[in-house]
Image: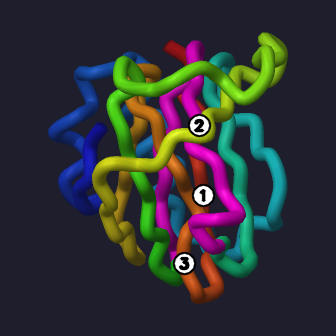
Amino acid sequence: MIIDILDNADLYAGLNPRFPAAFAFLRRADLAELPEGRHDLEDGLYAMIAKGPGRKVEDALIETHDHYIDLAYLVSGVDRIGWKPRRDLGPTMEAPDPRSDVAFYADAPTHWSEVGPGMIAAYFPEDAHMPMIGDNEMHKIVVKIRI
């Protein structure tokens, strides 16, 4: 897991060959005006833009991904994201659909981080995470980076 500000993103560019393109996308001058939904960027890299209210912890599940890194960026609002090492999780709630690259668990996070405007948070396959927790409106972008 990485939590930092977008201004420091280049420090992590060497971790994945698609990181530089992901960071460049997040630095677009028109980022806040892009419509909600999926934006394909290049092979193995796409962004999901969402706007809406945060969720309560009791309405959310912790999740993992096998083939993608989630790189979250907040345009506005604050996302309180839960985290737990994947190795410490119990069994999945149901058999994961390999086409969706997500598995859900009944486990509770062990750590919480507040990610606000201008911040990035990267969750790798070994990081279970519970995003979109908060009592505020969020404008959030998640860049999906294939590993």
Where is residue 95 drawn, in percent x and y? 79, 15
Whether pointer 3 and pointer 2 mark residues with C-beta atoms closer than 8 Å, the reply is no
Residue 38 vertical position relative to residue 117 in the rendered view, above or below? above
Residue numbers of the magenta segment: 56-75
Where is residue 66 drawn, in percent x and y? 57, 15
* Helix, strand or loop under label 3: loop
Q: Which residue sits at x=33%, y=60%? A: 112
Residue 27 visible (yes or no): no
- Quarter occupied by residue 20: top left
Q: Which mark is residue 28?
A: none
Q: Amino acid at mark 1?
A: Ile
Q: Which mark is residue 63?
A: 2
Give the CA distance from mark 2 to mark 1: 17 Å
Q: How is the image coloured?
A: rainbow
Front residue of 49 and 133: 133
Q: Is residue 102 magenta?
A: no
* Name of the residue lying farthest toward the bottom: 136
Q: Amino acid at mark 3?
A: Gly
Q: Which mark is residue 134?
A: 3
Q: Which residue is mark 1?
A: 141
Q: Which residue sits at x=46%, y=78%? A: 78
